Image: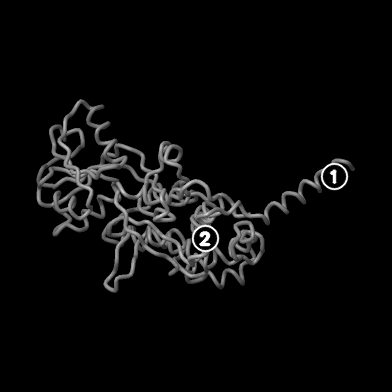
Amino acid sequence: MRFSKLFAAAAALAIAGMSTPADAGAVLDAIKARGSFKCGTAQPTPGWGYTDSSGAWQGFNIDVCKAVAAALFGNATKIEYVVVTSQSRFPALQSGEVDVLSNNTTWTLARDSQLGFNFAPTVFYDGQGFLVPKKLGVTSGLKLDGATVCVLPGTTTELNLADYFRANKMSFKPVVIENADEIRRAYFEGRCDVMTNDRSSLAAIRSLASNPADHIVLADVISKEPLAPVVKHGDDQWFDIVKWTVYALLEAEEYGVTQANADKMATESKDPRIQRLLGQTPGMGAALGLDEKWALNAIKAVGNYGEIYDRSLGPKTPLQLERGINDLWTKGGIMYSPPAR
């Protein structure tokens, strides 16, 4: 009997705790007062983040911010886009010039701890590689001894490059350029023999060539690059909102909830997991301090994770990136969400 009473009391406390979101801080308070948040995105890059013919921002990283806006405000347009460079992005986040970075930032120990950041779930597992002109006849990074290499400053890319060449007892001459457009021009104009970056970014750069077939991304993968949205320490509720919005997009793909069928699934599905995710069973929204339709709004705004991927990065886009390890765990990949319950 005593055990039963203790169990009941513990369960009551757990349920009560679920209705209390993490402590809000100055970031979320300012966002709510402003009625929008500031999304730090990289200089325009095909597939990842760019402006279309009407001047509207599109792309994989942009859709992540749109999903967060829809979850928070019920409106995917409540965003101010701020372009940041590889060197300006971290000061911009620390100073409050931006509220979240969604710009292919690699999750590392030092950035997570010393710089005072929190990384939301990885949205793309990548690795650093090399883009070379096919005419050079290079088939491996190990054949690049003495090469001139274009690289962005202030990045893990720059550090990995030095590590790779040192470990393999090779030399190289860096061409360090911060502006994304200028470094692409330098590569295409032959001012460097090779460009190094995340392999997905190299695919985007290759797509800009006058003839993409004249360039190849080598098979070498010289690093681990888990790319994730980033917020600064000090506002747990804002971090939870960004984090669980990403997870909701993954959950939606796993359960077959799409941009087109989300409303129907919300009202007709009998799956308790889908009922919780889409707000038919209350509690998840309250736990985040959001409307119960937070995930439904995010999915209706941009689709599930797979839809976002296919639209911006997938095999039918100029980047032609297969899902690979970025597929769901149920399909041989490693993309996985904790349960929304």
Q: Find numbered disc 2 in the image and state the secondary structure of the residue it sits on.
A: helix
Residue occupied by mark 2: 252
Q: Position of residue 85 (x, y in %)?
A: 29, 51
Callout 2 amino acid: Ala
At 30% from the left and 42% from the top, the residue drawn is 155
**Label drawn at residue 223:** none
Q: Is residue 325 visible?
A: yes
At 38% from the left and 58% from the top, the residue drawn is 309
- 324 left or right of 143? right
The residues bearing labels 1 and 2 have C-alpha atoms spaced at a distance of 37 Å
Q: Position of residue 31 (x, y in %)?
A: 49, 61
Mark 1 or mark 2, earlier in chain: 1
Frontmost residue, 68 versus 282:
68
Q: Position of residue 208 (x, y in %)?
A: 20, 58
Residue occupied by mark 1: 4
Q: Position of residue 12 (x, y in %)?
A: 77, 51
- 30 left or right of 141? right
Frontmost residue, 7 versus 230:
230
